[in-house]
Amino acid sequence: MQVETETHEETHALGVRLGNLLRPGDVLLLHGELGSGKTVLAQGIGQGLEVAEPVTSSSYVLMTEYAGRLDLFHADLFRLDDPAQVADLALEEVAAAGVLIVEWPERAWEELPSRHLLVSIDEIGQGRRLTLTPRGERYDELLAALGTPPVESGAGRD
Ligand SMILES: Nc1ncnc2c1ncn2[C@@H]1O[C@H](COP(=O)(O)OP(=O)(O)OP(=O)(O)O)[C@@H](O)[C@H]1O
Ligand SMILES: [Mg+2]
């Protein structure tokens, strides 16, 4: 699935929609150049998960945990020197309890859960193209749900 966003706000809003749909154990890998919008998307996801604190991206902490509707574990591997450090984080176990988002997954592909939603962000002119690739059945379902427009509140419900 591909989505184009023209602004920061549109990328954030996509993150909110994704965050609303996430379940315990979900893993999202966010791939893209410096400044492509990975953290903007992660902040939207945090909002969708009802995380009250602002989601930031510290260069010096590999992973930050935020409490929300589900706990959010946000890892930024940009400064990772050795993929073995990621093995120490035991990400698969961590993710089982909540939602795991990883920026700069290419620093440690082999250490990351093989089933995940890969989000690749490319700059196109002023905007961004987000390519969402499901790796595992759960993520086929997630994309199917994301592709279904949200029900207007009140309309069509009893
Ligand atoms: N369509 C867009 N979507 C997201 N961000 C955008 C868009 N257009 C412009 N921007 C700007 O691009 C920047 C994205 O920054 P962000 O910190 O999210 O990038 P990042 O991919 O996390 O970078 P890093 O690799 O340094 O962590 C922000 O300054 C944001 O305002
Ligand atoms: Mg970032």
Image (tube, helix red, strand yellow):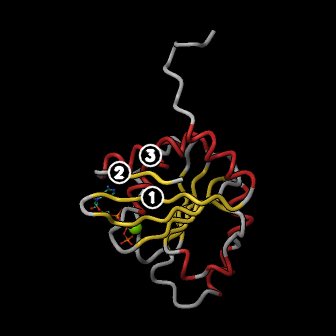
Secondary structure under tag 2 reads strand
Q: Residues within 10 Å of mark 2 (few under 14, many from 20)?
A: some
- Number of numbered labels in the structure image: 3
Q: Nearer the viewer, mark 1 or mark 3?
A: 1
Q: CA distance from mark 3 to mark 2?
A: 9 Å
The reply to whether the C-beta atoms of the residues labelled 2 and 1 are less than 8 Å apart is yes
Secondary structure under tag 3 reads helix
Q: Is the residue marked 2 within 8 Å of ligand 1, measured from its CB? A: yes
Secondary structure under tag 1 reads strand
Q: Quadrant of ligand 2?
A: bottom left
Q: Residues within 10 Å of mark 1 (few under 14, many from 20)?
A: many
Q: Residue furthest top?
A: 158
Between 88 and 123, the one nearer to me in the picture: 123
- Circle 1 is placed at which residue position? 130
Please tell me which residue is depicted at 60% across the width and 13% down the height of the picture.
Answer: 157
The reply to whether the C-beta atoms of the residues labelled 1 and 3 are less than 8 Å apart is yes
Residue 21 in which image quadrant: top right
Q: Earlier in the sequence, mark 3 or mark 2?
A: 2
**Percent x, y for residue 144?**
63, 42
Which kind of residue does numbered mark 3 sit on? Leu
Q: CA distance from mark 2 to mark 1?
A: 8 Å
Which kind of residue does numbered mark 1 sit on? Leu
- Circle 2 is placed at which residue position? 5
Looking at the image, residue 64 lies above or below residue 146: below
- Circle 3 is placed at which residue position? 14
Q: CA distance from mark 1 to mark 3?
A: 10 Å
**Percent x, y for residue 86?**
63, 79
